[in-house]
Image: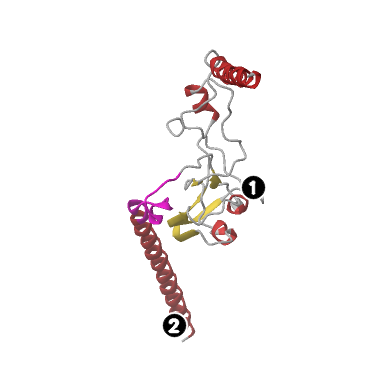
Amino acid sequence: MGAYFQNIKDGFTTAFEGMSISFATMFVRKETVQYPEVDISSNATIAEKYKGSLMGMPENYRGILDVDLSLCTACQICQKACPIDCIVIDNIKCDKTKLSDGDGSPVLNRFTQKEALKTRTVTRFDINAAKCMYCGLCEKACPTSAIRHTNQFEMNRESQEELILRFVSDDVKATAEKRASEIEAEAAAKKAAKAKKAQEEKAKEKGAEE
């Protein structure tokens, strides 16, 4: 008989212990983020939408890759550094320019500390996020820091084709190809003019000798 009442007592005690924890959490700040509705890729978005103590992604987190084409010199070093060939770059000639930041300061090659010179431009810069293993080798190899890992880690898509990040639009490609053709035509014209001038000078020298 005593065991029967002891079981009832234990039942009430354990129920009270469990409910005491539930009741206690009703009067404290919530520690739950409504993910994926709330973006947790940065501290700023968490601070705006969540008042708890959770932090965003760490600064050195290697997430989805991003490319700043304004800093890219189309050197293809990142493509060569990638161990699984998930980066594909096509390039063509462009006007020779020195890269500069938004404030006008020159962009330095971080390995040679010299001004970055752009002589080619990309007509294709694709990254297959489905293959990428987020090793960071491309980021370390880039001399101008044009390619970098972001804090973004979400990329749910319905097909693998949609996981290919394409950073060069068709319009940009067409414009670059048109300018490359003009540069080649200008170079060919200069070469022809130089050859013609040399031929004329040679003819004059030959006439003078006669």
* Magenta region includes residue 166: yes
Q: Residue at x 65, y 22 (%)?
A: 3
* Magenta region includes residue 65: no
Q: In what element is the residue under mark 1?
A: loop
Category of crowding for the residue at label 1, using alpha-carbon neighbours closer than 10 angstroms: few (below 14), some (14–19), many (at least 20): some
Quick check: 40 above or below 178? above
Question: In front here: 129 or 190?
Answer: 129
Q: Say which amino acid is labelled 1.
A: Arg
Q: Which mark is residue 67?
A: none
Q: Which residue is mark 1?
A: 110
Q: In what element is the residue under mark 2?
A: helix
Question: In front here: 149 or 21?
Answer: 21
Name of the residue lying farthest toward the top: 27
Q: How is the image coloured?
A: secondary structure
Q: Which residue is mark 2?
A: 207
Q: Residue at x 63, y 49 (%)?
A: 114
Q: Quadrant of residue 31?
A: top right
Q: Which residues are magenta?
A: 155-173
Q: Position of residue 105 (x, y in %)?
A: 56, 38
Q: Position of residue 135 (x, y in %)?
A: 60, 52
Q: Position of residue 137 (x, y in %)?
A: 61, 53
Horizontally, is 70 left or right of 55 in the view?
A: left
Q: Position of residue 16 (x, y in %)?
A: 58, 16
Quick check: 205 above or below 14? below
Between label 1 and label 2, give the one nearer the viewer.
Answer: 1
Q: Say which amino acid is labelled 2.
A: Gly
Question: In front here: 77 or 43?
Answer: 43
